[in-house]
């Protein structure tokens, strides 16, 4: 049980470290609003990763098959969501944002960021593929006889591993926050938002191209 728990933590860390669109959002939020805003985005991703870990753990075939059958549509919709999030960040004015956040409840802001991270990860089919690959790489298998406690240990290890990475990233980035002025934050928003939007656009184009190619084969 302890060995599987340690393996689960390593899987969680390995699943989170690659800096995709969500990593950029975490960095941008940490610089813009502080450590806990960036960490909240990561928590949303951790929840989604834990959900995908449950699928990998139990080999829930119908969900895996659904994602495989609808991979093109998931890429298309997920890309559109990431594109919109990127554009939203790029077009934000940190000065107006600061005034609004001064009157907005802290918990409300963090819940919104958690939802953003959850949405970005759950609409990324690559997250499930990566999780399945990591389970195979670390040889994490509960075997034929396992208890509910075994499952909870593994899933809590996954969540702990992913959340640890996002806390370290958001904390490390937020250390540089005071060095940036609002005008510099505007530039950071523009750059990070544009990068996220481009990654989303690439995913959207790939999904659309695969759909069109699939339709052309059906037409033949």
Image (cartoon, rainbow, N blue to C red):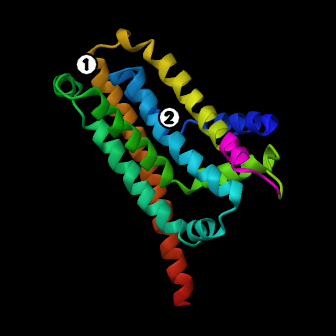
x and y, in percent, of residue 26 in the image: 45, 31
Q: Nearer the viewer, residue 81 or 114?
A: 114
Residue at figure coordinates x 42%, y 53% from the top left = 201
Q: CA distance from mark 2 to mark 1?
A: 22 Å
Task: Name the residue furthest top.
Answer: 179
Dot 2, how many residues are within 10 Å of its Cα: few (below 14), some (14-19), or many (20+)?
many
Dot 1, how many residues are within 10 Å of its Cα: few (below 14), some (14-19), or many (20+)?
few
Whether residue 17 appears in this view of the structure is: no
Is 219 displayed left or right of 85 in the figure? Answer: right
Residue at figure coordinates x 33%, y 23% from the top left = 33
Q: Is residue 40 above or below residue 131?
A: above
Residue at figure coordinates x 69%, y 50% from the top left = 148
Element assignment for label 1: helix
Based on the displayed image, in which of its 4 quarters is residue 60 positioned? bottom right
Residue with the mark numbered 1: 183
Range shown magenta? 145-154
Based on the displayed image, in which of its 4 quarters is residue 12 positioned? top right
Residue with the mark numbered 2: 23
């Amino acid at each position: 049980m302890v060995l599987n728990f340690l393996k689960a933590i390593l899987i969680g860390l390995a699943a989170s470290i690659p800096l995709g669109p969500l990593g950029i959002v975490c960095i941008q939020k940490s610089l813009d609003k502080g450590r806990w805003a960036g960490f909240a985005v990561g928590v949303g991703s951790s929840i989604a990763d834990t959900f995908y870990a449950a699928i990998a753990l139990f080999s829930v075939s119908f969900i895996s098959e659904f994602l495989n059958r609808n991979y093109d549509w998931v890429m298309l919709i997920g890309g559109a969501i990431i594109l919109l999030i990127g554009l939203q960040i790029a077009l934000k004015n940190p000065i107006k944002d600061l005034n609004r956040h001064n009157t907005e409840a802290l918990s409300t802001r963090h819940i919104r960021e958690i939802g953003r991270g959850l949405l970005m990860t759950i609409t990324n089919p690559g997250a499930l593929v990566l999780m399945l690959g990591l389970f195979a790489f670390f040889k994490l298998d509960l075997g034929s006889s396992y208890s509910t406690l075994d499952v909870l240990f593994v899933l809590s290890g996954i969540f702990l591993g992913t959340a640890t990475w996002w806390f370290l990233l958001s904390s490390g980035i937020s250390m540089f926050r005071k060095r940036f002025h609002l005008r510099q934050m505007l530039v950071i928003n523009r750059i990070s938002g544009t990068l996220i939007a481009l990654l989303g656009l690439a995913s959207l184009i790939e999904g659309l191209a695969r759909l069109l190619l699939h339709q052309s084969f059906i037409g033949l």
